[in-house]
């Protein structure tokens, strides 16, 4: 039995024993322990893109706008969603004569920071200044660049002036509000701000938060404890205490669930689909399982600064050389469809007529020969200089499914003569440094979670390649540079006609599939494993996590 087949046997060959009786209702339970697989690299809302941070902070903060479980844009920190129709959004000309828009928001009158300080327009202006500074390392650079001015109407009302009228003109989901009274001093040294922010040096400071919960305790790499926020204006949260426990190994995560050390496993960052399916077969009566398909794109970034990967023929050979359909079918029971672009089939802008790369090892071998990589008698591939075709692949250590997929990829690429070496890292290092600072030399496997119709500016526009010069802001980790892609991204943001946008989206997906700055793998379905007594958890299927509505969770 080969290594791949043996691994499959371990995953799916487990005997089904007698399942315990369903758990009884625990209406009096006031503590909830959640298991996730990663620890945040930072607690700053606007630095580094990492779901572990988003999941925790969503219980302690509220964005101005967010997408709900029905994928509708809603107000959370604001009183009313501005629209052109209600007059709170007004198209205008910028000082440079461009077509822009002025959008007016009003902060909830009862919104206060956890230390009692009122949330005001001054916090909005301060957040904008931090985001616009070129050395702070804020991830969503374009939001702050486009936001060229803010007018303060009063303590609770402000008008944002954007230098372009986009179809998402009123969605400021990524504008993570900062408390001026706590962050003003760290920001005085802007170049070192990301290392001095109170979100990391004083994480349990109540004044950093304004959601249903406050962060009461943090043990790096281990757990985060949350307790109710007395200044929270909304529905009183049910649980007296929530513990988010980090268990990096997914097999250990499952063991902790079965032992009762944790109550639930977060779907956003928990078990892989194959593990959940096996667990449900054995313990389906004990837990409630929700499988939520969504805008979650598993892929492999390719460092295009690597001369080997800079050759498009090698990139196409890598994709032709792996059987992604078999991986989806055998590992994930066909529930995770093969991806051909970053746009999910669930999104209305998904295009069907784009280049697709079936498993074709002979085609892969031909492409490698054309790229100058000849097969030796020993089965390896070398170029004219005698250099061996060797690449390094990295992902999050302890994720059993990803590590299994790595083994399959390594085995299938070996048949082509490609020597692929595995070097995994803890998620906090992998996301907080290796990927963010483009320190991976070859391939980096992870997932992007997006919003509906999310324009890929930060991941595909050439202006968003992280570098020391921009303090590693931006998320174009592959280093992809394509003038046509840049032009399309610029156009699609300001196109208000849906059908015209559909045509632009089709061109974006065709370029993506043709150029292959990454290897698309599949679109994930996230499994939520919940105790039967827990009510109110509603997965969204996109980047706004279920914890944004944690005050609705309760023991039934």
Image: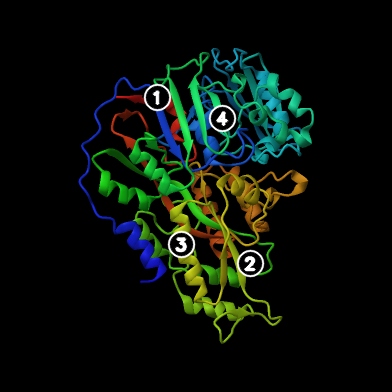
Residue nearer the viewer, 377 or 92: 377
**Labels 4 and 1 touching (C-beta < 8 A):** no
Residue 165 sits in quarter: top right
Residue at 54% x, 72% y: name it.
317
What is the x, y in percent for residue 497?
52, 43
Label 1 crowd (10 A; few <14 / some 14-19 / many >=20):
some
Pointer 3 or 2: first along the chain: 2
Which dot marks residue 218?
4
Label 4 crowd (10 A; few <14 / some 14-19 / many >=20):
some
Which dot marks residue 309?
2
What is the x, y in percent for residue 251?
41, 49
Pointer 1 or 2: first along the chain: 1
**Circle 2 SS class:** loop
The C terminus, quarter of image: top left
Residue nearer the viewer, 443 or 28: 28
Residue nearer the viewer, 21 or 312: 21
The N terminus, quarter of image: bottom left
Label 2 crowd (10 A; few <14 / some 14-19 / many >=20):
many
Instruction: From the image, state whether disc 2 or disc 4 is nearer to you.
Output: 4
What is the x, y in percent for residue 58?
51, 30
Which dot marks residue 353?
3
**Labels 3 and 1 touching (C-beta < 8 A):** no
Distance between the alpha carbons at the discs numbered 4 and 1: 17 Å
**Circle 1 SS class:** strand
Distance between the alpha carbons at the discs numbered 1 and 2: 49 Å
Report which residue position mark 1 lands on.
Answer: 31
């Amino acid at each position: 039995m080969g290594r791949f087949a043996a691994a499959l046997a371990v995953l799916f060959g487990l005997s089904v024993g007698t399942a315990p009786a369903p758990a009884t209702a625990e209406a009096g339970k006031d503590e909830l322990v959640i298991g996730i697989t990663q620890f945040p690299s930072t607690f700053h809302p606007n630095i580094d893109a990492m779901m572990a941070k988003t999941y925790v902070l969503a219980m302690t903060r509220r964005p101005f706008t967010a997408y709900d479980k029905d994928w509708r844009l809603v107000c959370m920190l604001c009183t009313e969603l501005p629209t052109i129709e209600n007059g709170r959004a007004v198209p205008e000309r910028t000082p440079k004569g461009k077509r822009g828009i002025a959008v007016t928001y009003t902060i909830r009158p009862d919104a206060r920071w956890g230390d009692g300080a009122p949330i005001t327009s001054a916090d909005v202006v301060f957040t904008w200044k931090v985001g616009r500074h070129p050395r702070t390392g804020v991830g969503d650079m374009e939001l702050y660049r486009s936001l060229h001015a803010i007018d303060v109407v009063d303590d609770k009302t402000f008008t944002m002036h954007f230098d372009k009228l986009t179809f998402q003109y009123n969605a400021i989901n990524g504008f993570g509000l900062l408390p001026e009274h706590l962050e003003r001093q760290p920001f005085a040294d802007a170049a070192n701000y990301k290392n001095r922010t109170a979100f990391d040096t004083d994480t349990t400071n109540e004044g950093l938060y304004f959601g249903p919960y406050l962060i009461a305790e943090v043990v790096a790499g281990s757990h985060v404890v949350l307790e109710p926020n007395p200044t929270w204006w909304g529905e009183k949260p049910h649980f007296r205490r929530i513990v988010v426990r980090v268990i990096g190994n997914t097999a250990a995560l499952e063991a902790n669930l079965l032992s009762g050390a944790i109550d639930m496993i977060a779907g956003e960052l928990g078990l892989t689909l194959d593990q959940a399916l096996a667990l449900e077969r054995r313990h389906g009566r004990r837990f409630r399982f929700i499988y939520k398909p969504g805008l979650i794109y598993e892929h492999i970034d390719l460092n295009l600064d690597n001369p080997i990967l800079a050759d498009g023929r090698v990139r196409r050979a890598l994709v032709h050389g792996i059987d992604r359909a078999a991986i989806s079918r055998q590992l994930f029971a066909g529930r995770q469809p093969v991806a051909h672009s970053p746009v999910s089939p669930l999104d209305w802008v998904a295009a069907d007529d784009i280049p697709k790369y079936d498993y074709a090892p002979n085609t892969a071998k031909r492409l490698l020969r054309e790229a100058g990589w000849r097969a030796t008698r020993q089965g390896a591939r070398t170029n004219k200089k005698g250099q061996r075709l060797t690449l390094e692949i990295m992902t999050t250590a302890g994720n059993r499914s990803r590590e299994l997929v790595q083994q399959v990829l390594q085995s299938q690429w070996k048949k082509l003569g490609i020597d692929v070496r595995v070097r995994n890292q803890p998620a906090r290092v992998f996301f907080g440094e290796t990927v963010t600072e483009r320190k991976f030399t070859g391939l980096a496997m992870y997932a992007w979670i997006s919003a509906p119709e999310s324009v890929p500016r930060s991941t595909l526009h050439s202006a968003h390649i992280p570098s020391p010069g921009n303090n590693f802001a931006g998320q174009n980790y592959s280093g992809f540079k394509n003038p046509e892609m840049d032009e399309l991204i610029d156009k699609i943001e300001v196109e208000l006609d849906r059908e015209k946008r559909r045509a632009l989206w089709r061109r974006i997906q065709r370029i993506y599939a043709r150029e292959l700055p990454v290897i698309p793998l599949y679109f994930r379905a996230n499994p939520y494993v919940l105790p039967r007594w827990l009510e109110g958890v509603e997965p969204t299927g996109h980047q706004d996590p279920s914890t944004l509505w944690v005050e609705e969770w309760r023991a039934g």
